[in-house]
Amino acid sequence: MIDTQNQRDDRNIDIDKVGIKDIRYPITVRDKEVKTQQTVALINMYVNLPRDYKGTHMSRLVEILNEHNRMISIHN
């Protein structure tokens, strides 16, 4: 299969913002009393696309999100 995203693009146009919008992602939040709450975050993830690339691997954005999944608290 041809990897279109990594092929050179001859249109010579930078794109400032490409990505995924409105990802609904489950998170755990710890409050001041150290209790936890389950909720769903609405996340947007974007990258810039230099003029020499035809595309980006959107699935890698979600991989990065999954790699950094941890409990959120008021202290971090």
Image: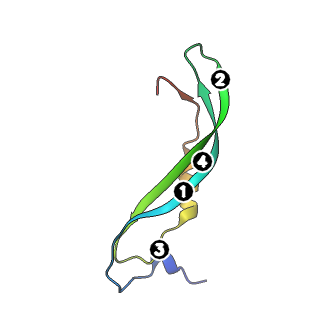
| Residue 50 position in % (x across, y down) | 35, 71
| Between discs 4 and 2, the one toward the N terminus | 2
Q: Secondary structure at mark 4?
A: helix
- Residues at marks 4 and 2, CA–CA distance in whole angstroms: 19 Å
Q: Residue lying farthest bottom?
A: 10
Q: Which residue type carries mark 2?
A: Thr
Q: Which residue in the structure is indicated by mark 2?
A: 36
Q: Which mark is residue 10?
A: none
Q: Which residue type carries mark 1?
A: Lys
Q: Which residue in the structure is indicated by mark 4?
A: 66
Residue depicted at x 31% and y 81%: 12
- Residues at marks 3 and 4, CA–CA distance in whole angstroms: 22 Å
- Residues at marks 3 and 1, CA–CA distance in whole angstroms: 16 Å
- Residues at marks 1 and 4, CA–CA distance in whole angstroms: 16 Å
| Between discs 1 and 4, the one toward the N terminus | 1
Residue depicted at x 54% and y 64%: 58
| Residue 27 position in % (x across, y down) | 63, 37
